[in-house]
Image: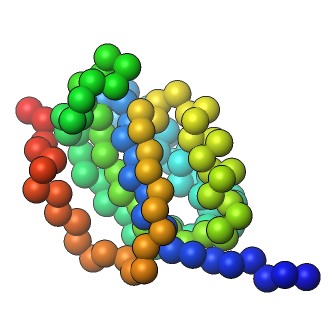
C-alpha cells in the first residue's frame, strides 16, 4: 500500500463582509474543519480583517481575509476545493504549496477598509 504524501500549503480565504461576527466565525470554522477532517493539520493562521477587494466580486466590495498554513495529504486538496465552491459565504480562495510556514504576514498593497 502506498503511503500518502503530506505537503505544506498556504490557503487564503475571503469571506463575505456582510456576515455577522458569529456567522463569520462559523463559516471560517467550517473551512478549518474541512481541512482537519481530510487528514490535515493547521500549522498557523492569520486573521487579516476586513479589507477592500481589488475589484467587485458579485457586487461585493469588501471581505474578511484569512491566511492559513496547513499540512495535508496531497490527495485531499481537490476534495477541499470542491467543498469551497459550495461554500456560499466564501467569496474567493487560493491554495498554494509552500516550503515553510511564515512567522509574520505583511501585505503592503492591502489596506484595511474604513
| Nearer-the-camera pick, 76 or 35 | 76
Horizontal side of residue 66 vs 39, given as left or right: left
- Please indicate, yes or no, whether residue 61 appears anywhere in the rendered image: yes
Give the percent coordinates (x, y) of residue 108. 10, 56
Say which quadrant the C terminus sits in. Answer: top left
Give the percent coordinates (x, y) of residue 74. 65, 68
Q: How is the image coloured?
A: rainbow
Quarter occupied by residue 75: bottom right
Above or below, comparing residue 23 to residue 47 in the picture = above
Quarter occupied by residue 25: top left
Above or below, comparing residue 65 to residue 20 in the picture = below
* The furthest residue to the top: 59
Residue at 13% over, 42% down:
112
Residue at 29% over, 34% down:
63
Say which quadrant the N terminus sits in. Answer: bottom right
| Nearer-the-camera pick, 49 or 79 | 79
Give the percent coordinates (x, y) of residue 80. 62, 50
- Please indicate, yes or no, whether residue 18 appears anywhere in the rendered image: no
Residue at 65% over, 42% down:
82
Give the percent coordinates (x, y) of residue 36. 62, 62
Above or below, comparing residue 88 to residue 27 in the picture = above
Horizontal side of residue 102 vs 42, given as left or right: left
Amino acid at each position: 500500500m502506498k503511503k500518502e504524501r503530506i505537503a505544506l500549503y498556504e490557503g487564503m480565504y475571503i469571506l463575505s463582509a456582510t456576515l455577522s461576527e458569529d456567522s463569520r466565525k462559523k463559516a471560517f470554522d467550517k473551512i478549518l474543519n474541512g481541512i482537519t477532517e481530510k487528514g490535515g493539520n493547521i500549522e498557523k493562521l492569520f486573521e487579516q480583517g476586513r479589507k477592500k477587494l481589488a475589484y467587485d466580486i458579485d457586487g461585493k466590495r469588501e471581505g474578511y481575509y484569512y491566511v492559513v498554513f496547513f499540512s495535508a495529504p496531497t490527495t485531499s486538496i481537490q476534495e477541499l476545493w470542491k467543498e469551497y465552491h459550495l461554500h456560499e459565504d466564501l467569496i474567493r480562495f487560493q491554495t498554494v504549496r509552500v516550503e515553510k510556514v511564515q512567522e509574520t504576514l505583511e501585505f503592503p498593497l492591502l489596506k484595511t477598509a474604513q
